[in-house]
Amino acid sequence: MNATLPHFLIISAALFSLGLLAALSRRTAIFILIGIEMMLAAANINFIAFWRMAPRMPEGADHSGVMFVIFAIAAAAAEAAVGLALVIAIFRHHRTTKVNEINQLKG
Amino acid sequence: MAETVDQLFINLKQWLLGWLEWAPEWGVQLASIFINISGVLGVFLTLFALISLVERKVLARIQNRYGPNRVGPFGLFQPVADGIKMLIKEDIVPHRADKVVHFLAPIVMVAPAILALGVIPYGRDMTAFAIDGGILFFFAVGSAAELAVFMAGWGSNNKYSMLGAMRAIAQMVSYELPLILAAVPVVMAVGSLSPTLIVEAQGFGDSSTWGADAGFLGGLPHWFVFTPWGAAGFALFFIAALVESNRTPFDLPEGESELVAGFMTEYSGFKYAIFFMAEYFGMFAVSGMAVTLVLGGWQAPAAILQWVPSYFWFFLKLGAMGLTFIWIRGTLPRIRVDQVMNFTWKFMLPMSFACILAVAIWHYSGRGLVAWGISAAIIAIAYFLMSRVFQTKTRFAPRTYRYAE
Amino acid sequence: MNIFALIIISVVVLAGALSAAFLPRLVHATLAVILTFVGVACMYFLLGAEFVGLVQIFVYVGAVAILIVFTILLTNPEEKSEGVNWLGILAAAAVFVGLAWAITNTALPGQVPEVEPLTVKQIGDTLMTDYVWPLMGIGLLLTAALIGALILVMEEKE
């Protein structure tokens, strides 16, 4: 039996909600970033699944799904890098990474 | 006749698959993959045993002593003795170590090394997995090996392991960049990421992208190492390969005089043997990739020598690179960690960008003698600029002497 | 495309994601997330986008995971396990139910079209012709992220 588009979409929806769960159920800032990365990965699976399963246009190949995912992976990596740098900078100041303890604007 | 010997292993595999005509198609595919994998593993496990002995004897001779010479003639059964010793040693796990992570670290270390061995072409049509993005696959699984170093250091719950692991990861991550960027000029010149096509492009003038002597000096073989960007790329790749395998002069992570054994401190017996094997497999993989990229892969050095089987040339070149690794280990002292970092960020990275610029100009200047001259000039200028302008000698204060009163 | 392969890969991905949400020790959760990323890369291979799968392993497992690991090493978070966040589970379940309802009630193509495999050369050609401005933009973004991350963690010279 072949795997069709709804299968992939359900799996990516499950990964998205699990990423949301990971982002919501952790107190450490690092793990919230990890949850965001999982949600981005789920969205990328959606793109590739639609690119693969869509009916083919007769006037040549359309690679926009793959292109979008390549740029999305690059942007996600950049955002993870800057986010983790922020976490380290905040840790140096507050000496903690728990997001419920970083609740003062004053240093 | 030469053709038969050259294609010996391919014909052997086809004969073996002929026994499976009754099987469904996915069965034949699985069997084919299995035969490929066992071939690669068999060859490289034997080579690993041999090179551990060769390393000890060559290092010993460099240090003016004999190596192991008691077990068998010329110490040839020493790897067997080593293997038996590793297998029967007691496996000690520290009490407060993280058991799952500690157990998985050697496995995660050796798996990328074996995976990387699969995309290298060992002879004509003899690649285990011939995928389109082979070079990218090689570097992608190579970058997964750093995780294993972290797992080993963390899982041991030991300060020395943690320090060694952090140094090793910092070193390996920093040298990933020159390693990959040194392979980019070759990919640009050939126009493909597939190692099979890269080796074929270094052949003898029957590939459509090359003229008879296009861009090369006279009767030299058409390997990329004889072009200026190829030679510089090879030097960069070789140094980065030394760092990636954590070998002297960059073996600070396992600096035996400082860190006990670095991230491998708490591993004994079979797990240490797996780490040892992973280090050598990594060395083979990266040497194999260097041979494929710039040294011509399985191509013979001269057109008249093409009757020698292709895998013979490949393993000859691989052996030469392995011997060079061992030679450098026996000769050079260890480099300090801040010198290592300075070297990569201030010298090797700009040099690799200069190589990329040089290959672009070489290609668009028609790949002739003029192009050779211009690209050699670019690389020479870049080299002198980097090494003179970015001098990072620490300036010491004048020495003061204090004597005991 | 076999459904067995999809089942195995999706079990790996979802098990990794679930463990990442619930494992008490941070290093174990990081390893589970790395397993998820590898599973997602396998799913890209299954869907025929091999280059993207390789880029996923390269970027996520080889770079983002190392970043996360280094941050955990440098900040040493305590590993006290708090109680299960029921509101979070409820929110995630609600999102999943909503998405699944939307997916099953949409008319989606049921058959799998046959395509020739996507080579790296085609991706390169497309990147350099149709998508050259996003390529320049992403280069700029990555440079800005690099410089920004460096400035954020540089020690200020007193």
Image (cartoon, helix red, strand yellow):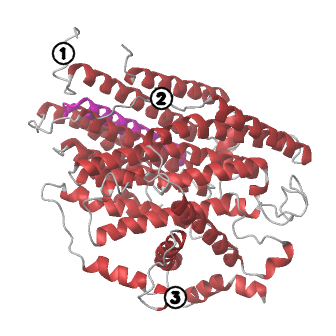
Task: Indicate left or right for B284 with C3 as reference.
Answer: right
Q: Residue at x 11, y 38 (%)?
A: C80
Is there one chain holding both mark 1 and mark 2? no
Q: Position of residue C114 (x, y in %)?
A: 59, 56
Q: Is residue A24 left or right of residue B59?
A: left
Secondary structure mainly formed by the magenta segment? helix
Mark 2, other Cα within 10 Å: few <14 / some 14–19 / many ≥20 = few
Q: Please report the residue visible at 87 percent of the width from the left and 47 percent of the height from the top.
A: B367
> Which one is nearer the viewer's eye here, B345 or C125?
B345
Tag 3 residue: B22
In the image, is C124 to the left or to the right of B224? left
Discs 3 and 2 share one subunit: yes
Residue bearing mark 1: A103
> Hey, what amino acid is under mark 1?
Asn
Residue B244 screen position, x and y as percent: 49, 53
Quick check: can you spot residue B191?
A: no
Q: Which residue ends up furthest to the front in the rendered image? A: B405
Residue B262 shows in this picture: yes
Q: Is residue B129 magenta?
A: no
Rendered image: mark on residue B396: 2
Give the extent of the magenta segment.
A24-53
Q: Residues within 10 Å of mark 1 (few under 14, many from 20)?
A: few
Left/right placement of residue B184 relative to residue C39 reads: right
Question: Does residue A77 sit above or below B279 in this rendering?
Answer: above
Figure label count: 3
Look at the image and say whether residue A42 sits in the magenta stretch: yes
Quadrant location of the C terminus of chain A?
top left
- Chain of the residue on which disc 3 is drawn: B
Specify few, some or many for label 3: CA neighbours under 10 Å numbering under 14, 14-19, or 20 or more: few
Compare residues B129 and A16 and report the one nearer the observer.
B129
Secondary structure at badge 2 equals loop
Residue type, numbered disc 3: Trp
